[in-house]
Image (tube, rainbow, N blue to C red):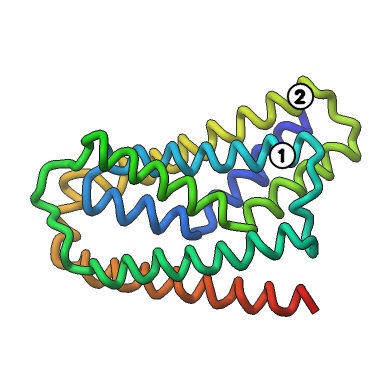
Amino acid sequence: MQDFLWIAGAHFLALLSPGPDFFLVARSSLAHGWRGATGACIGIALANGVFIAAALGGLSVLRAGSTAFLVVQLVGCAYLFYLGWLFLRHAGKSSLDAKSASGTAHWRDGLLMGFMSAILNPKNALFYVSLAAVLASRHTSAGAMVAYGAWMVLAVLAWDMAVALAIGSATLRQRFAQALPLLERLSGVMLIVLAVVLLVQAGSGSR
């Protein structure tokens, strides 16, 4: 029980830290309502599930300093630049008065974008590999590992859905109607800054 509380607490604190996934969910929720953001939320949760399964399964290919990890960092930088550019390019073009875009095509696009955002974030890999190393050192059983992994995937999904529900409410969307272009530009800038920081870290780590 103590291990579970430690894992759950550390994971929740990590979720509280805003990153690319948060900006993606927030932007989707403001532009399309919480239903329009469900695809992105599920995609993010699935990507986290991939990292969790790999880390708890003992896959060390994404350990810090490895070639595979450096590739993920560089591709992640490129994707963050791309997301930031999209946010800046489409700033002010989203209509908050439109009906929630919850159609199949939009949901599928959100799912893919959410998955790519999370799977190309090397900080996710580092976090789960670190947790897995701690659990391995405590000789955690396979059953407990599976339970912890399932909990973390559900926690990611629940947190992102909560963010989508809070930000995507009709009342809040109306209040943010005029501020949305500025928020989109700020989100775009933040994503590009994150990409630059990640690129610098990748460069220093490869030396």
* Residue 92 quadrant: bottom left
In front here: 195 or 104?
A: 104
Residue that appears at 54% across and 77% down: 196
The x, y position of residue 69, in whole percent, is: 71, 59
Q: CA distance from mark 1 to mark 2?
A: 15 Å
* Earlier residue among tags 1 and 2: 1
Residue that appears at 49% across and 76% down: 193
* Residue 102 quadrant: top left
Q: Secondary structure at mark 1?
A: helix
Residue that appears at 54% across and 57% down: 17
Q: Quadrant of the C terminus?
A: bottom right
The x, y position of residue 84, in whole percent, is: 39, 69
Circle 2: residue type: Ala
The x, y position of residue 93, in whole percent, is: 16, 64
Circle 1: residue type: Ala
In front here: 126 or 156?
A: 126
Please determine whether, in this image, residue 190 is positioned above or below residue 71: below
